[in-house]
Image (spheres, rainbow, N blue to C red):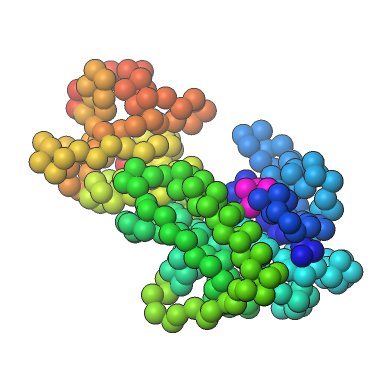
Amino acid sequence: MRLVFAGTPAVAVTALEAILASRHTVEAVVTKPDAPAGRGRKVERSPVAVLAHQADIEVLTPARPREPWLLNRLREIAPDCCPVTAYGGLLPQQALDIPRHGWVNLHFSVLPAWRGASPVQHAILHGDDITGATTFRLVAELDAGPVYGVLTEPVRPTDTSGELLERLASAGARLLVDTLDGIDDGTLRAVPQGTEGVSLAPKLTPADARVDWKLPAHLIDRLIRACTPDPGAWTDFEGDRMKLLPVTLLPDDAPAGLAPGELHIERGAVYAGTGSHPVRLGDVQAPGKRRMRAADWARGLRGAQTTRPGFG
């Protein structure tokens, strides 16, 4: 089939690479415009745009996917199907109607669970044991279209959203190519989604990523892992925002005695109090500083005591 691929971040590159290695032909890609990225805020192409340029594929970068010039170009290309992975824009009905087999989205959850922008983060945040990926045909309603294929993936106890998404991106890329093959062969038909078990996964913001030390340890652990690497879990320390990487949960019978956010500093470890029992801190990153082990950071605290007021 002749395809137009839509995607933007690095996770979509895996899907595009798999399609480029398949029997199908990618005529163009639709991706977000160049934008500031990284600590230096240098304007850069999206990861999908970088790969498309390397493969000598036409790149379409509308500010909004309803722009008339984009719709006209899609009609000129007349793709058979448009696969989508993490594009980041809401496609209008005029665009959805152009390819004869529609737009086929690779979504990183088992729909109808976790419809929305951050399905992997919400699966970890809510303690799901199993998640997965789904290919489905886009419709006007958010992530509600009929389903072509599904795969499942265990959520490991120490998974960050980045680690889990990396596994889902690899397995999901194969699922997307298999779906395109089945559509092309006429052997695959989309099945309507069920109406039970619908849950929503809105994008997590930096405000959502602030750790509330009054919560139980297991909820703090989930929040930090869900927000790693994006948007990045953080806490207040002496008026500054400190980034937190995953912590280690201690046994349920671990000694208590630390108030929420209070720190206990030992030679090789730093513990923080929670609403239940303490957690051992992993890596931390203070503003303008490099990422480091919590024990190394604690050695640099002026007048550090064994137990001291800590995070707010």
Residue 20: give x, y in percent of width and height: 73, 51
Residue 244: give x, y in percent of width and height: 39, 37
Viewport quadrant of the N terminus:
bottom right
Quadrant of residue 36 within the rendered picture: top right
Q: Which residues are magenta?
A: 13-17
Confirm whether the magenta stretch covers residue 16.
Answer: yes
Residue 19: give x, y in percent of width and height: 69, 54
At 62% from the left edge and 74% from the top edge, which residue is drawn?
187
At 74% from the left edge and 44% from the top edge, which residue is drawn?
51
Q: Residue furthest right?
A: 76
Establish if 37 lies above or below 300. Answer: below
Majority secondary structure in the magenta region: helix
**Residue 242 versus residue 171: which sits nearer the camera?**
171
Is 78 situated left or right of 222 in this image?
Answer: right
Residue 104: give x, y in percent of width and height: 64, 68
Establish if 175 lies above or below 260. Answer: below
Viewport quadrant of the C terminus:
top left
Confirm whether the magenta stretch covers residue 100.
Answer: no
At 71% from the left edge and 74% from the top edge, which residue is drawn?
101
Is 69 situated left or right of 26 in this image?
Answer: right
Quadrant of residue 198 within the rendered picture: bottom left
